[in-house]
Image (tube, helix red, strand yellow):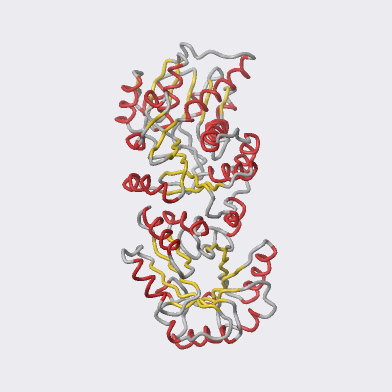
Amino acid sequence: MICVSIARGRHRHVMAEHRHLVQQGAQLVELRLDYIGGEVNLKRLLADRPSPVVITCRRERDGGKWAGTDEQRLMLLRSAIAEGVEYVDLEDDIASQIPRYGKTKRIISLHDYRKTPDDLNEIHARLASHDPDIIKLATTANQSHDNLRMLELVARSKVPTVGICMGDIGTPSRLLAGRFGAPFTFATFHHERTLAPGQLSYQQMTDIYHYDQIDAQTTVYGVIGDPIGHSLSPMVHNAAFRRQGINAVYIPFRVPREHLSQFLEDAPALGIKGLSVTIPHKEAVLKKLSSSDATMTGVGAANTLLFDNGKIAGFNTDYQAALDSLEQALEAHYGRKGSLEGQAALVLGAGGAAKAIAFGLKQLGAVVTIAGRTGQRAQQLADGLKCKTLDWNNRYAFQPDLLVNCTPVGMHPNVDATPYDKHHLRPSMVVFDTVYNPENTLLIKDARSQSCTVVTGVEMFVRQACLQFKLFTGQEAPSELMRDVLKRATGPAKY
């Protein structure tokens, strides 16, 4: 179950949002009294309420906005209990001052906005000593391992426990709470009005992640990177799981470089069976693999991991997806399968995607040149593939037949940027931009205006996602659905 928090300054707005959420399917709502301006009218808020509620009045030190006195706050919470609310949230230091009464259930809570303490078990035991029906622990995740610590505490607790790690590193704890036995998790009314770092909206939790369908048997997949908030992979893969009737969820995991090893060790305990890998981990994960596919040696980067019996297998679906996308564009352009034999290709970038695509182009006979914004990385990539390199500032001195952008330049929100000036594009060129959000980057728009043959990042993204889906599930992916979801997500209406 999802508890949706409402924090508005006026009573009528709180009540309107409450009714709207219930119409959308919400079963439990938290009313944040500390956000209401002026005197709180409990009877008005609670009369004819359309669903059960949690009453919360949080002090500033606990992440709230209560500006009144402590005694006024205690009186408000006691009054809520007297009105027969379903739940009341009490911080552990005031729980003994507010006795149990009637049918109202007690949530005993603690919030730590600095860290996830080392002594979680001791803190949990202290909260359990205050006669709770539910314990709520909300701490800040400073490392990926904090999620597993929190979720394992939830799983072994004898008292129903809501355990959440705040911050974008902690978002997985919110999504996996139910899988580990939490009675509910928290979401906000709207994604632009989060009440705690890393919080998702009710719509995101239901429409993208289908939270209420996650149970102890749900298989976990995800994408790791840093940053990761921009990734649209969760939309695409979760829609595919739902269409195919697969009990699985796909989650974004923000994993800083220094946490990668620990995260991969933790992955099986989190229920993870497979991962997509993005910047900056595509090369670093190679050291952690037990096995890899045939192209990995040449590509030198992995974008897909499978976990099985303590072993990690690596794959690269970027490679095949990029070549398939290019071949389709060339066939459409020439009316037949085009050849890259002897064609001059300029690859912009030197990361994992650039490695995969440059390797594939060489396999098809293209003469590849690498231009990276970091000269040393570009040189290392060129040396590894035995191809040429070009200083980034001199990239216009080279006239390629095929231009491939593997940098993030032009990615949302920096949509007015391009890695290659329009005036250097020629009608005979094929221009391939691996950026998929937006699909029509400035580079793609410029290339079309110059009558170039174009390949968008959407084509490559969907193809590599379909290949990943097959590796994850053993089933063919619903490619048209995945393409449609991605196009809608990168269009005007976004979450």
Against 237, is 197 above or below?
A: below
Give the mark count.
Answer: 0
In the rendered image, residue 340, in percent from the top left (x then y), is placed at 50, 14
Q: The N terminus lies in which quarter of the figure? A: bottom right
In the rendered image, residue 469, in percent from the top left (x then y), is placed at 55, 36
**Quarter holding residue 355:** top left
Q: Is residue 329 left or right of residue 255?
A: right
Against 236, is 290 above or below?
A: above
Against 403, is 87 above or below?
A: below
Instruction: Choose between 149 and 61: the one closer to the eye.
Output: 149
In the rendered image, residue 197, in percent from the top left (x then y), is placed at 45, 61
Against 411, is 180 above or below?
A: below
Instruction: Choose between 406 and 395: the one closer to the eye.
Output: 406
**Residue at image point 63% right, 43% down:** 488
Q: Is residue 247 left or right of residue 300?
A: right
Which residue lies most toward the top here?
Answer: 342
Instruction: Choose between 185 and 493: the one closer to the eye.
Output: 185
**Residue at image point 56% right, 54% down:** 214
In the rendered image, residue 310, in percent from the top left (x then y), is placed at 38, 41
